[in-house]
Amino acid sequence: MNNILVTGGAGFIGSNLTEALLDSGHSVRVLDNFATGKIENLLPLLEKYPDSLTLQVGDIRNMEDCRKATEKIDYVFHEAALGSVPRSIKDPITSNEVNVSGFLNMLIASRDAGVKRFIYAASSSTYGDSKSLPKVEDVIGKPLSPYAITKYVNELYADVFSRTYGIETIGLRYFNVFGRKQDPNGAYAAVIPLFVKKLMNHESPLINGDGEYSRDFTYIDNVIQMNIRAMETTNPEAINTVYNTAYGERTTLNQLVGYLKEYLSELDPAIGQVEILHGPNRAGDIPHSLANIDKARNLLGYNPQFSMKQGLKEAVKWYWNNL
């Protein structure tokens, strides 16, 4: 079993990944500053795995925190970032400090600590204004937001570090991940938990635009599988590259709301009558997103188990019991 660092391990994806790694018998150290993560996501795990899970409160913008976090670590899962396109448009400087400077700090600390492999959260926003569908890893366009720029810079740094210093890196371009523990609160909440919360409160969700923009919504358990396969692969062709991390199916926002109303109204029939509102398109949003996942299937053996609708049913159940 390995000693593993998960940065951002108190967040949505990070805490689910931490749980899966602990369940598999690994020792995990979490580095988080709780800017967006929540201690509540870790408390049950700290109780269940007192000898295997350690929490380091710190910031990836602080090099000393990064060096301390990577001591005696075999694998790094770098999930820490400031997400959200609108947040980056409002405050590009902080997004850059966290997502670029913090990323570089973690790469340097991992290199100097002799980490075996650095697996990091990349983003489908890197495809930018490329109109080709489905998205294939080596065809990208110009970024459409400060956030997208930061995630593309991550890929460039990882590539240079693998070539120059020999550290193994794998980037996972996440496509609209959703599922348990995704926070429905705050100004930058993701669309699915936000809509679920609104519908459960009999409030009207607001769709940006006409609702025909589409996304490759990807359930959290598929993403966990992808991360584990990225760590476990021994195929030399599979490292020092990036992968689409998705299901490979697109859903419009109108369809998404229809599914949510259908599944939630089984629990509360009044939800079926909630009106849906439409507003203007949001700056920086790409119209359509759909992943080709052949590369991950072929090189990593990735085999996503949850379709969007299967994942949505699981997520709705979780929110119903936990909100």
Image (cartoon, rainbow, N blue to C red):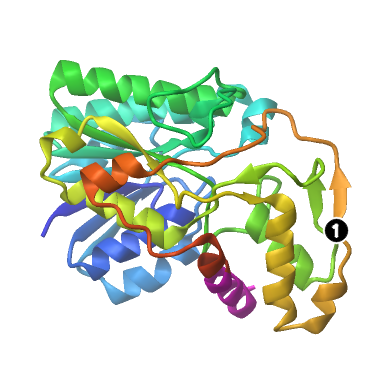
- What residue would you read off at disc 1? 276
Q: Residue 167 in the image: state x and y as whole percent.
A: 16, 28
Q: Is residue 11 visible?
A: no
Q: Is residue 52 above or below residue 161?
A: below
Q: Quadrant of the N terminus?
A: bottom left
* Most frequent secondary structure within the magenta stretch: helix
Q: Residue 51 in the image: state x and y as whole percent.
A: 20, 68
Q: Residue 198 in the image: state x and y as whole percent.
A: 77, 64
Question: Which of the 4 quarters of the picture holds residue 47?
Answer: bottom left
Disc 1 marks a residue whose amino acid type is Ile
Q: Quadrant of the C terminus?
A: bottom right
Q: Residue at x 54, y 28 (%)?
A: 132
Q: Residue at x 20, y 35 (%)?
A: 239
Q: Is residue 5 visible?
A: yes
Q: Residue 316 in the image: state x and y as whole percent.
A: 61, 72
Which is nearer the eye, 148 or 219?
219
Circle 1 Cα neighbour tier, 10 Å, few/some/many (<14 / 14–19 / ≥20): some
Q: Is residue 69 above or below residue 199?
A: above
Q: Is residue 321 magenta?
A: yes
Question: Which of the 4 quarters of the picture holds residue 201?
Answer: bottom right
Horizontal side of 305 relative to 202 (left or right) equals left
Label total for image: 1
Q: Is residue 32 above or below residue 137?
A: below
Q: Residue at x 11, y 34 (%)?
A: 114
Q: Is residue 270 magenta?
A: no
Disc 1, SS? loop
- Magenta region: which residues? 313-323
Horizontal side of 39 relative to 228 (left or right) equals right
Which is nearer the eye, 35 or 312?
312
